[in-house]
């Protein structure tokens, strides 16, 4: 008989793995890993505001991450600085602001849990947030999948096909914001990027079509979550880092396996 807290952790982890696996493919294709990491860092300010103003952690994260994405989008359109420079300024500014706000307000906050996540403490309300946010992300991706894939392959070609690049970029940023908002409470600020990148990067050598890569990334993410939770419970290690460790091992094995398959194919 599985304990209820383990069951809820598995449900939450699988839900996050599905969403981050699919979104992670676009992050890898578009080389936006730093954006995902920066967005996660900005969540610290959202957590501080959510707790300080009593609006809830998830709501605070969603508001601040949305503002972060919109400011970045506006600055990109203005062409003031390179994107990586803007990301560094905004991310570390938001992270520092969040830590300072928590410090001066006297809030009692478990910074370790915020940074590295604590999936074993998932509650029913957390599952509702993950389920609702995840469903919205998946529905939106389903509706815009062909346009988003085409824009990822070539923005010039997508524009020639009549796709509004401006709005598609905005949709992608908002989807990333929602993914981070529903995931960071469980996975942690420092580890959410790993969930976005590692499963997709592991799946990439074995996929020839975008849909195949997305499916493989989801499967790899689910295996990583389940194995990481099992490792955490068996040897009493932090759950979030345990999940990322398993995913990292899977990536290393995948790289070796893909190299072997390539040599066999060419021989």
Image (cartoon, rainbow, N blue to C red):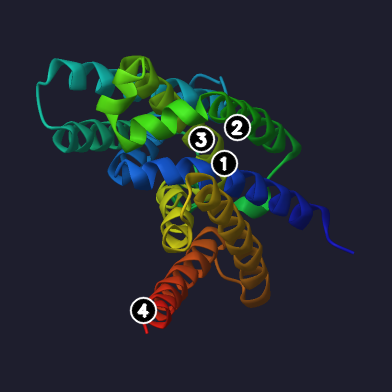
Q: Secondary structure at mark 2?
A: helix
- Density class for disc 1 (Cα within 10 Å; few <14, some 14-19, many ≥20) is many
Q: For the residue labelled by badge 4, is the local secondary structure a helix, a strand or a loop?
A: helix
Which secondary structure, mark 1?
Answer: helix
Q: Position of residue 209 (x, y in %)?
A: 48, 49
The residue under label 3 is: 179
119 relative to 226, above or below: above
Instruction: Determine the CA span between mark 2 and mark 4.
Output: 38 Å
- Whether pointer 3 and pointer 1 mark residues with C-beta atoms closer than 8 Å, the reply is yes
Q: Which numbered mark, 4 or 3, is in the foreground of this view?
A: 4
Q: Quadrant of the N terminus?
A: bottom right
Residue for point 47% across, 63% down: 206
Disc 4 target residue: 266
Q: CA distance from mark 4 to mark 3?
A: 40 Å
The quarter of the picture where residue 201 lies is bottom left
- For residue 109, say whether it is visible: yes
Question: Mark 4: few, some, or many residues within 10 Å (few <14, many ≥20)?
Answer: few
Residue 138: image tag: 2
First of labels 3, 1 by sequence position: 1
């Amino acid at each position: 008989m599985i304990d209820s807290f383990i069951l809820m952790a598995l449900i939450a982890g699988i839900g996050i793995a599905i969403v981050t696996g699919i979104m992670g493919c676009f992050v890898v294709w578009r080389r936006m890993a730093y954006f995902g990491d920066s967005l996660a860092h900005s969540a610290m300010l959202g957590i501080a505001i959510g707790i300080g103003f009593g609006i809830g952690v998830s709501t605070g994260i969603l508001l601040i991450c949305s503002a972060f994405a919109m400011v970045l989008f506006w600055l990109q359109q203005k062409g003031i600085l390179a994107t990586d420079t803007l990301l560094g300024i905004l991310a570390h500014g938001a992270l520092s602001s969040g830590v300072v706000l928590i410090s001066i307000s006297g809030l009692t906050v478990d910074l370790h849990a915020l940074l590295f996540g604590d999936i074993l403490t998932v509650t029913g309300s957390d599952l509702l947030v993950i389920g609702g946010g995840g469903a919205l992300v998946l529905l939106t991706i389903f509706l815009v999948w062909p346009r988003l894939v085409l824009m990822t392959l070539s923005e010039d070609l997508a524009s020639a096909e009549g796709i509004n690049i401006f709005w598609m970029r905005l949709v992608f940023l908002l989807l990333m914001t929602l993914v981070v908002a529903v995931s960071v409470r469980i996975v942690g600020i420092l580890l959410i990027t790993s969930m976005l990148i590692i499963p997709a990067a592991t799946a990439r050598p074995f996929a020839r079509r975008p849909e195949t890569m997305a499916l493989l990334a989801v499967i790899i993410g689910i295996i990583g979550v389940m194995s990481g939770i099992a490792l955490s419970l068996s040897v009493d290690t932090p759950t979030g880092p345990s999940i990322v460790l398993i995913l990292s091992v899977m990536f290393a094995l995948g790289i070796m396996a893909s190299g072997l398959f390539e040599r066999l194919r060419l021989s």
